[in-house]
Image (cartoon, coloured by chain):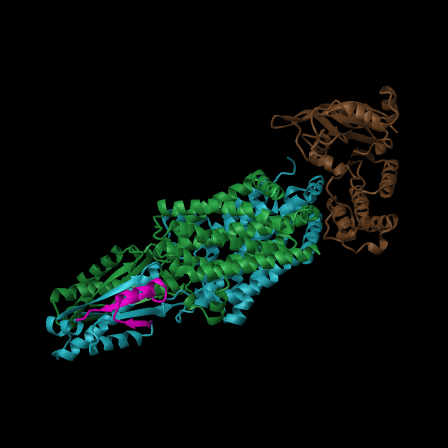
Chain colours: A green, B cyan, C brown
Amino acid sequence: MKQFLSFVKKEFYHIRRDKRTLFILLGMPVMQILIFGFALTNEVKNAKIAVLDNSKDASTLALSSQLEASRYFDIAQELHSQADIEKAFRAGKIKLVVVFPQQFDQDLSHFNKSQIQLIADASDPNVATTLTNYATAVIMDYQNRITNERKLPYTIKTEYRMLYNPQLKGAYTFVPGVMAMVLMLVCTLMTAITIVREKETGTMEVMLVSPVRPLKIIVAKAVPYLLLSIINITSILLLSVFVLDVPIRGSLALLVFESILFTITSLALGLLISSATNSQQTAMFISLTGLFLPTVMLSGFMFPIENMPLPLRVISNVVPAKWYYHIASSVMIKGLGLAAVWKETLILTGMTVFLLAVAIRKFKIRLA
Amino acid sequence: MRTLKFLLQKEFRQVFRDPAILRMIFIMPVIQLMILPWAADYEVKNIRLAVVDNNHSDYSRQLISKVTSSGYFQLQHYSSSMQQAMQEIEADKADLVLEIPAHFSKDIVKEDEASLMMSINAINGVKANLGGAYLRSIIQDFNREIRLRWIQFPRFNPELNIETTSSNWFNPHLNYRYFMVPGILVVLVTMVGAFLTSMNIVREKEIGTIEQINVTPIHKYHFILGKLIPFWVLGLFVLGIGLTIARLVYGIVPVGNVATIFCFAALYLLAVLGLGLLISTYTSSQQQAILLSFFLMMVFILLGGLYTSIDSMPAWAKAFTKINPVSYFIEVMRMVVLKGSGLWDIRYHMLTMAGIAVVLNSWAIFSYRKRA
Amino acid sequence: MTNNRIITANQLTKIFGGFKAVDSISFDVHEGEIFGFLGANGAGKTTAMRMLCGLSMPSSGSATVAGFDVYKEPEKIKRSIGYMSQKFSLYEDLTIKENIRFYAGIYGKSDAFIKDKTAKLLQQLHLGSEANKLVRSLPLGWKQKLAFSVAIFHEPRIVFLDEPTGGVDPVTRREFWNMIYEAAASGITVFVTTHYMDEAEYCNRVSIMVDGKIEALDTPSALKRSLHAASMDEVFLKLARKAVRSGD
C-alpha cells in the first residue's frame, strides 16, 4: 500500500509540475462546455433569407413581416427578378428565397387559393430542409389564423406540448454529449500519452524492475486522472446548471456515479491504447481516429443513430460514449432513475471490465 | 537556398520513415472518408410514433393509417393508455405520442370541433419541432378530406389554401454526402497540417536535436520554412487523395474547378501550419502540444459550420467564425464543389485567409527564439 | 600552442529569476588548447557553455568567442563553432550518411567537400559498411563518436563538448579522447566539460566551477601542486567540498 501511494504521489507531482498541462486539463472542459453549450445547436435561428415579392400587396407584406418576426428568419435581401436568386445564392449568404407570385392577394380573395414558392440552398441539406419546414409552418400558421376567423365546420384542432425541453434549447442535447467528449478526452488521451511517454523516456523500465506489481503501477497511473475527472465532472455540472440552465432532474448521486463509471471506462481504454503502442505520436493517432471522431459522430448527440446505415448502427454499440450519452441525458433531462438505465449501466460496466482485463493482460505480456 | 535544400531533404526523409505519420497521411483520410459521411445525416425521418386511441372509431383508424402511410412516421406503440405511451417515451422507444380523445369522432360531427393532443420528446429541439410540424400538416390534410366528405362545396373551396412548393437548388436530391464529404475533407487537411507541424517541432525540442540546430548559423526563417514546406506539400497531397475518394466512392465531381480548391487550400494550409508552428513555440512537450492542438482543433472544427449552422450561433461565436480558418475553407469547399463558384467569387475568402496566414506565421516566427 | 585568446569571458553572469546560475566568471581560452571545464552537477557549467555558444543570453558581463561578441554577433559565432550537447543530438531516424550530409549542408559546405570528407570519416571510424544504417541501430559509444565527428565536420575553429563521454565504456572513452587530441592537433580549440577527473588530466588547462564561480584555473599539474593533491580527483574534492548548492 505504501509503495502504491508513493507511485500515486509521483504521478501527482508530474501533473502538478507541468502547469501548462494542468491548466489545459482543468480549463479545457470549462471552456468547452461554455463554448459548445452556448454555440452548438442544430436548431436553425436567424437564417438569412431573401424575398422575391412579385405582388407587393397586403397579404404578401403581412406574410413577409410574419417571417421576419419569427426567430428562425432574418430577411436580409429584397430581390427583384428571378435572375437575382442565383446571384444571391452564389454569394453564399442567403439560405432560402421566398417567391410570391403576381396577384397573390387577388388569387387568395377570389379563388381562396394561392401559391408560394420556396427555394432553398441545399448545399447544406440539413439547413435546407429545416428552413423549408419552418417557412411552411409560418405560412400555415398565417393561413390557419385567417381560416379560424371564418369559423369553418368540422374542424380538428391540434394541441401539443413539448416534453422535457419546452423551450427547445440546443444545450439540452449537447451538454450530455460534451460531457462524454470531455471525459473521454481527458482520461483516454492523457493516460495513453503519459504511459507511452514513460516508455519513450525509459522510466517505465525502471518501474517495471521495481518490486511493485505491474497492476499497481497501472492503477497508480490512472488514479490521478480519475480524481482530475471528478473535478471536471463537478465543474461541468455546476456550469450546466447555473450558467446554461440545463437542469439535473434525476438523482445527482446517480449521475455522478454513472459519470465516474464512464471515466473508468475511458481510463481503461487509455491503458489499452498505451499497452499497444510505443510512441506518443501513434498513441495520439489512435486516440484521434479511434476515439474522438467516433465519439462525436456515433454517440448520437450530433447525428441521430437511427438514420445511419446498419453497419454504423452496429458499430455505434461498441462506442462507450453512446451508452453514457444515453444514460446522462435520461438522468439529467428526463429525470429517470436507475430502473430505466440499468441495462445501459450494465453494458458500460461490462465494457470497463473487459477493457481493463485486456489492458492488464497485455501489460503483463510485455513484461515477459 | 542551399541550406533550405538540406533541411527539406532531411524532413522528407524523416516523414517517410515514420510509420505514425504515414498512417496519418494515408490511412486516416481513407477510413474517415469511407465511414463518417454515412453517419452525418440528421434529416428527420422515421419518427417513432405512439398512439393512444381512446376513440376506436373509423375516424381514428383512418387518421392513424394516414399518418403512418405518410412515410415520416413509424407506428411504434398503439394502446389506450397514456401511461404506457409515456413509458415508451421514457425508454426512448418513441419520439411522439398522439392522443385521440374518447369523443373524437362524435365531437367532429356534432360539435364541429374536435381536438387532438400531441406530446413530443423535445430533448432534441429540432426533431421535436419538425416532427410536430409534419404531424400537424398531415392532420390538417385529414381535416380537409373530412370536410369535403360532409359538405358539397359549390364551385370553390371556402377554406383558404396557400400552397407552398419547395425546390432545392445545388443539391436537388438532398444528398447528405455532397454536403459532408467536402466538410470532412477540410477537417482532415486541418488535422494533418496543425497536428503534424506542432508535434514535429516539439519532438525536436524533446529529444534535444533542436539545440544542435540552434548552434548552427542557420537562419530562423530557413528552419521554419524547412518545417512548413513538407507539411504544406503533405496537406495538399491529403486533399488530393480525399478529392479522389470523393469522386470514386461518392461520385462527387466538383461543379467548379478543382484548381480553385487547390489555390485556396494552398493559402489555407499556410494559415493552419502557422497555427501548428505557434502551438509548438508555446509548448515544451509533445503531450502539451497534443492537448493544445486537440483543444484548438475541437473548437475550430465544431464551430466551423460543418456540424451546426453558423447562422444560429450567438453573436460572439459568429464573431469567432470570422477568424476561424476552418469555417472559411468549409464555405469555399461548398461553394466550389456544389455551386461552381470561381476564384472571383471567393476573392474575399482568399484575402482573409492570406491575412490570417500572415498574422499567424509572423507571430510564430517572432516568438520562435534561437536562444533563451 | 600560440597564446592567441580565442575565447574571453569577463564577469559573465546568468541569473534565472533570483538564482545566480553563473556568477561573474572571467577566463580566457587560448587558440589550439584543450580547455577542461570542470564542476559538480549544478555548478553552472552547461549554462556558461550555452551562453558562449549563443544558445542563452547572458544577464551581464561580456564575452567574445572567435573574436565575436556574444550579445551582438551570435550568428557569426555559430559559424565558427561546433557543439555537442549532453543529450545525444543526431537524428535517430536518419542514416549515418544522411546525418553527416544534413549537418554539413546547413553549415554551407559544398557537395564535393561533403562527399570527400564523408568517405574519409567513415573509413576512420570504421563505419564504411554501416553508412546507410539508421543511427538508432548504433551502440551508444559509436553514436557519441559519430556525434563528435559531425560537430567538427565543418572544420570549426572551436568545438564545445558538453559531457561528451557520459555513459560510455572506458575503452570507447579512450578512443574518444584520441579523437579529441587529433582535432586539437589539427588546430581546433576544444572546450570540454566533464565529471571524469582522469579526463581532466588530458586537458592543457582546467577550470573548476563551484556554485557558479570559477574556484581554480590552471594546468592540471600546477593545480595539484598548489593544493598539495596527488590526483585531480583530490583537487576536485578539496574544492568542491566548499559547495553550498547541491547537485541536481
The residue drawn where x is 26% and y is 56% is A70
- The picture places residue B358, in percent across and down from the top left corner, at 53, 46
Task: Look at the image and tell me whether residue C230 can be seen.
Answer: yes
Q: How many marks?
A: 0
Nearer to us in this view, A23 or B208:
A23
Does residue B74 show up magenta in the picture? yes
- Above or below for A31 versus A355: above
In which quarter of the view is residue C206 placed? top right
Give how far across and how far down residue B187 sits, in percent.
Answer: 51, 57
Residue B183 lies in magenta, yes or no? Answer: no
Q: Residue at x 17, y 74 (%)?
A: B105
Q: Quadrant of residue A344?
A: bottom left
Please state if A243 lies on the left or on the right of A13 as rendered: left
Q: Nearer the viewer, residue C71 or B46?
A: B46
Residue A365 in picture, x, y percent from top left: 67, 58
Quarter of the picture containing the C terminus of chain B is top right
Q: Nearer the viewer, residue C38 or B322?
A: C38
- Which of the 4 image quadrants contains residue B212? top right
Residue C143, position as x, y percentages in the image = 79, 47
| In the depicted structure, whether residue B310 falls above or below residue B101 | above
Q: Is residue B158 visible?
A: no
Q: Is residue B137 left or right of residue A32?
A: left
Image check: A359 left or right of C38?
left
Q: Is residue A344 left or right of residue A52?
A: right
Q: In this orientation, which residue lies closer to the viewer: B173 or C201?
A: C201
Q: Residues in magenta?
A: B73-102
